[in-house]
């Protein structure tokens, strides 16, 4: 008997892009495990599934380079099969099939049953909420909806993910219960647009009711909100946040810009005045909450005056957390017919300018935390430090709390009261508070 016929397939899932892709990879891995397939995440395997991102130019480039890297490994005999799924292949499947034909098969974002079939597995409907999580054990992403109905001019997500589709509350509560049973203590709610949740299923914005139900799940101690769209924000969410201790005083609300001409061209459905009023309402309703936002600079037609308006507004608003991206000119979006007229170096200068302002704001806000004690969750150990987070910080994108592991021991996955003793631009340094 030939040795090759005894070889057992090990499926390596490689995830690129955002937390929504992480979630999709975890669902895929859960299905494969339920089919008794050996599956790993970003380790060695002879069958590779690449879950791609196709959002902006840098992400597309990373996805293409990763596909080429594994195709080369296949040609060298190091891997047997390469499958590609996710946003890039949803958006560019015909082009990819032509340009990189040595991939075994390409699948879109809603092709999970067909992808499983190609991997010799069956799609199991009864596995609602079953996933093989890839994040640290103490937190997990919970995707409450798929797709997006917003008409933003710069965004290709509706092309790749389709129309907004909420998941039923019962299914989400069941999924949260399963995660809690596996030791998850923090749920990070994600969607293309959290604030649209429920409109399709319940004919009203229902995020507040969902939060109340999730807060009842035993074992879940923190619930965090990501990607809330500003237009039509359901203010009853803030009431739940205020009264329910499990809901972190934190919200991620990507605002993209603030100059009225740019907001209008971006088709954001709001104005500088309305946005400022909304954020003032947030802070009045939940004093001390952390607001995270993301901004785009270098959008077509952005003048120096528009940029200055944005920069001045960032100074005035003093966001607790902020990220800034340069505009990416994406085909088939509404903005693609506009002239991409801001030079790349100017885009980068503007992004750097915003982040310099934010670094100073973040440093000042962090100095105010010195001497105070915060409940922190411990995510991991890195070198000589344990790394934790306050309720005001999301993993991978926000501030971290560093605890000297040569002096103190804390348990990974636990909540610990940490006294802040030092602070830099984006990091806090602390030690366990003495009771």
Image (cartoon, rainbow, N blue to C red):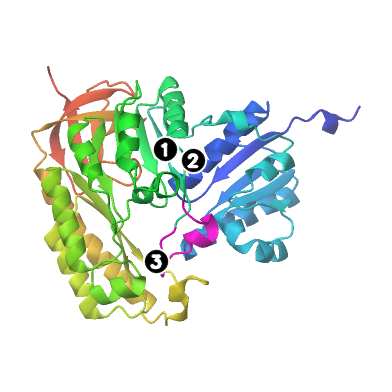
Estimate the x, y position of residue 333 in percent, counting from the top left. Answer: 48, 71
Q: Secondary structure at mark 3?
A: loop
Q: Is residue 338 left or right of residue 292?
A: right
Closer to the N terminus: mark 3 or mark 2? 2
Q: Is residue 354 left or right of residue 33?
A: left
Q: Work out which residue is located at the far right of the displayed protein and give it.
A: 1
In contact (CB < 8 Å): disc 1 and disc 2: yes
Q: In the rendered view, would you say 54 is above or below 263?
A: above
Tell me the residue at 22%/38% (across/down).
241
Q: Secondary structure at mark 1?
A: strand
How much space separates mark 3 and mark 2, taking CA atoms? 24 Å
Residue receiving disc 1: 141
Closer to the N terminus: mark 1 or mark 2? 2
- The residue lying toward the viewer, choosing from 122 and 16, is 122
Can residue 391 be seen from the camera position used here?
no
- The residue lying toward the viewer, choosing from 56 and 159, is 159
Can residue 338 be seen from the camera position used here?
yes
Estimate the x, y position of residue 2 in percent, counting from the top left. Answer: 89, 30
Residue receiving disc 3: 152
Estimate the x, y position of residue 271 in percent, counting from the top left. Answer: 23, 68
Q: In the rendered view, would you say 151 is above or below 212?
A: below
Task: Give the residues drawn in magenta, as a range.
Answer: 149-164
Q: Secondary structure at mark 2?
A: helix
Tell me the residue at 74%/51% (across/down).
104
- Is 161 a magenta residue? yes
Q: Work out which residue is located at the far front of the displayed protein and give it.
A: 203
Which quarter of the rendering shows the C terminus?
top left
- Residue 360 found in image quarter: bottom left
Label 3 neighbour load within 10 Å: few <14, some 14-19, many 20+: many
Residue receiving disc 2: 23
Which quarter of the rendering shows the N terminus?
top right
């Amino acid at each position: 008997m030939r040795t090759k016929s005894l070889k057992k397939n090990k499926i390596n899932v490689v995830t690129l892009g955002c937390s929504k892709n992480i979630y999709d990879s975890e669902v895929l891995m859960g299905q494969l495990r339920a089919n008794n397939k050996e599956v790993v995440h970003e380790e060695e395997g002879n069958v590779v599934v690449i879950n791609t991102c196709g959002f902006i130019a840098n992400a597309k480039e990373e996805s293409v380079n990763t596909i080429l890297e594994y195709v080369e490994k296949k040609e060298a005999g190091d891997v047997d099969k390469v499958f590609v799924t996710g946003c890039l292949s949803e958006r560019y499947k015909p082009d990819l099939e032509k340009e990189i034909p040595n991939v075994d098969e390409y699948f879109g974002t809603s092709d999970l049953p067909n992808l499983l079939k190609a991997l010799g597995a069956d799609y199991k409907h009864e596995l609602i909420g079953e996933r093989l999580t890839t994040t640290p054990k103490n937190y997990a992403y919970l995707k409450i909806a798929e797709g997006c109905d917003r008409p933003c001019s710069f965004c290709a997500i509706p092309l790749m993910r389709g129309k907004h589709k909420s998941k039923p509350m019962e299914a989400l509560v069941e999924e949260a219960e399963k995660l809690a049973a596996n030791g998850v203590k923090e749920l990070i709610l994600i969607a293309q647009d959290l604030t649209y949740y429920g409109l399709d299923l319940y004919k009203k914005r229902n995020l507040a009711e969902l939060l109340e139900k999730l807060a009842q799940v035993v074992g879940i101690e923190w619930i965090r909100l990501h990607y809330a769209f500003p237009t039509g924000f359901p203010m009853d969410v803030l009431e739940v946040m205020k009264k329910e201790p499990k809901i972190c005083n934190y919200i991620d609300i990507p605002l993209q810009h603030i100059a009225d001409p740019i907001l209008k061209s971006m088709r954001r459905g709001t104005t500088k005045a309305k946005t400022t009023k909304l954020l003032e309402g947030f802070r009045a309703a939940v004093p001390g909450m952390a607001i995270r936002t993301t901004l785009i600079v270098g959008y077509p037609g952005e003048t120096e005056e528009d940029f200055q308006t944005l920069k001045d507004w960032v100074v005035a608003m003093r966001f607790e957390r902020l990220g800034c991206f340069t505009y990416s000119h994406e085909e088939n979006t509404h903005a693609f017919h506009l002239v991409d007229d801001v030079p790349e170096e100017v885009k980068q200068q503007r992004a750097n300018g915003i982040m310099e302002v934010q670094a100073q704001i973040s440093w000042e806000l962090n100095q105010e935390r010195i001497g105070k004690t915060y409940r922190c969750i411990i995510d991991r150990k890195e070198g000589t430090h344990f790394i934790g987070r306050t309720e005001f910080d999301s993993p991978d994108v926000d501030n971290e709390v560093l605890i000297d592991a040569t002096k103190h021991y804390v348990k990974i996955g636990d909540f610990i009261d940490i006294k802040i003793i030092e602070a830099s631009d984006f990091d806090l340094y602390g030690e366990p508070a003495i009771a």
